[in-house]
Image: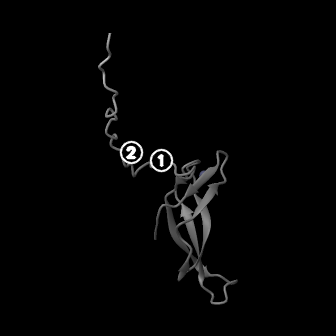
Amino acid sequence: MTTTAAPTLFDDEPPAPAARTPRTPDRPEAVNGLRPAPARLIAAHDPDIHDPEGRPLLYLVVTCCPYCGHQHVHPAGHTGEPRLCPRNSRCVGPQGGAYYFPAVHQ
Ligand SMILES: [Zn+2]
């Protein structure tokens, strides 16, 4: 009884195409535990008395927190010198969690 089966050296499958995760801009997946939070920039009406140039303060308002659904306000520097993305913070609501601001539109 002879075995003529040659060793299968050439049986490796071609690499499967990388699975592409569908882009879901409405509800993107969490990135490194961070969830995207829609935010917008709001300028205070009154000048900041603590700013030597008297510039109004800017606030980054998370309009719909991905964890608690409420608004969260974060300092964003002064007008003319905004501190925008990349930024991240934590929800202070009862559920909590870290989120980031993918983009900020005034
Ligand atoms: Zn929250």
Which element is circle 2 on? loop
Whole-percent x, y for residue 29 in the image: 47, 47
* Left or right of 11 on screen, residue 42: right
Whole-percent x, y for residue 54 in the image: 63, 87
| Mark 2 or mark 1, whichever is nearer to me | 2
Query: Is 46 or 27 nearer to us in this picture?
Result: 27
Amino acid type, residue under disc 2 in the picture: Thr
Q: Is residue 61 above or below residue 15?
A: below
The extreme left residue here reads 4
Amino acid type, residue under disc 1 in the picture: Glu
Q: CA distance from mark 2 to mark 1?
A: 10 Å
Question: What residue is rendered at 58% in x and 70% in y?
Answer: 59
Can you tell me whether the CB of the residue at mark 2 lies under 8 Å from the nearest atom of ligand 1? no
The residue singled out by tag 1 in the image is 29
The residue singled out by tag 2 in the image is 21
Which element is circle 1 on? loop
* Numbered circle sitting on residue 59: none
Question: What residue is rendered at 33% in x and 43% in y?
Answer: 17
Across the whole image, how many numbered discs are drawn on residues? Answer: 2
Query: Is 67 or 100 nearer to us in this picture?
Result: 100
The extreme front residue here reads 1
The extreme top residue here reads 1
Whole-percent x, y for residue 46 in the image: 60, 80
Whole-percent x, y for residue 99 in the image: 57, 55
CB atoms of marks 2 and 1 within 8 Å: yes
Q: How many neighbours does mark 2 have within 10 angstroms: few (below 14), some (14-19), or many (20 or more)?
A: few
